[in-house]
Image: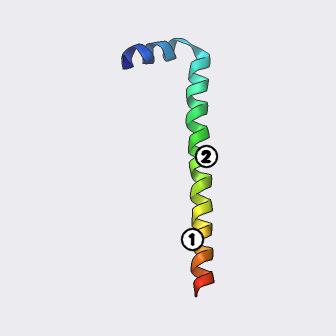
Amino acid sequence: MITKLKNLLSKNKWSKYILVGGFTFFLIKGLVWLIVFIIAGFSLINFGS
């Protein structure tokens, strides 16, 4: 099943763009949320002390 999916994705040029674009989107989204949580954590630490 996985090899069929890989063959299908490797044959089509647009599917590679969609795959890389989806990965990049979720990577950037995760980094943004990580920054948001770090800023919120530091502001709570500074506000508490």
- Secondary structure, mark 2, is helix
Where is mark 1, residue-wise? 41
Where is mark 2, residue-wise? 28
Left or right: 33 in relation to 4: right
- Using a 10 Å C-alpha cutoff, classify the residue at mark 2 as few (fewer than 14 neighbours), some (14 to 19) or many (20 or more): few
Q: Where 14 falls versus 28 (above or below)?
A: above
2 or 1: tag closer to the N-terminus: 2
Residue 39 in the image, given as x and y percentages of width and height: 62, 68
Residue 15 figure quarter: top right
* Alpha carbon separation for disc pair 2 and 1: 20 Å
Image depth: mark 2 or mark 1 in front: 1
Residue 23 in the image, given as x and y percentages of width and height: 55, 36
Look at 61% across and 82% down and name the residue there. Answer: 46
Look at 38% across and 20% down and name the residue there. Answer: 2
Three-letter code for the amino acid on which mark 2 is drawn? Ile
Look at 61% across and 46% down and name the residue there. Answer: 28
